[in-house]
Each structure stands twice: as C-alpha cells, then as structure tokens.
Image: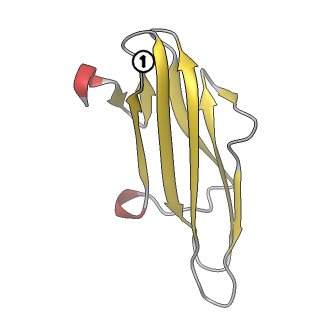
Amino acid sequence: NNGSGFANGKFTAPVDGLYFFSCMMLSNANTRLFHNFRVNNTIIDGTRSEGHAVSGSYMTCTITMTYSLSASDYVDVYVRNNNAYGGVYTNFNGYLVG
C-alpha cells in the first residue's frame, strides 16, 4: 500500500498514471453474483462479471482492468444485490503501471 491509496474499501490514486486492478469475489450459495469496477462512482463498462452458483454451490468471479487515473480519482468495486461474501473470500488489489 505504497502511498496509502487503499482505505475504506476503495483505492485513491496518489499520482496521475496508468493503473492495473483486479478483484476476486466468492458468491453466496445458490445466488447470482454481479460485480464491476467504478471510478469516481461511475461504473466502468467492460468490467462486469456475472456468475451463477447452483445446487448449494459457490462460485468465484474475477474482474480486471487497466485504467488511466488522475491524482485523487478513486476506484471501488460495486456489488449488485449484495450477493457476495466479504472478508477472506474477497480480494481487491491494484498497482501503478506507469
């Protein structure tokens, strides 16, 4: 967390640049999971996942994006319908490419 960009479930860019992000989530049992990235509270087209866990099972879905950010832009993960586990069953990470 160089630059302390990750806090309160979102990443705030410390400097202008090209950033890479990924997020993996585990669905709740027997549910559909939809999640995607947002930048400054705007959904980024092309980053949406859709998974459907059936018969008592769970499903992992992963999304990635490379995106140009200005300093102070922020990125978070939007989960539709709250059909995902949190905590140790989810990760959200990113880094400055250049």
Residue 69, position as x, y percentages in the image? 53, 16
Quadrant for residue 52, please give it.
bottom right
Q: Amino acid at mark 1?
A: Ala
Position of 38 with respect to 10 (left or right) is right
Closer to us: 90 or 8: 90
- Farthest front residue? 98
17 in relation to 90, above or below:
above
The residue under label 1 is 13
Please tell me whether mark 1 sits on a helix, a strand or a loop: loop
Position of 71 with respect to 38 (left or right) is left
- Farthest bottom residue? 55
Residue at point 58% right, 73% down? 59
Residue 84, position as x, y percentages in the image? 56, 62
Residue 55, position as x, y percentages in the image? 67, 90
Position of 71 with respect to 53 (left or right) is left
Closer to us: 59 or 17: 17
Quadrant for residue 28, please give it.
bottom right
- Farthest left residue? 2
- Farthest right residue? 45
Report the colour scheme.
Answer: secondary structure
Quadrant for residue 81, please give it.
bottom right
Quadrant where the N terminus sits is top left
Density class for disc 1 (Cα within 10 Å; few <14, some 14-19, many ≥20) is many
Residue at point 34% right, 31% down? 7
Residue at point 41% right, 19% down? 98
98 in relation to 35, above or below:
above
Disc tally is 1
Residue 77, position as x, y percentages in the image? 56, 41
Residue at point 49% right, 56% down? 24
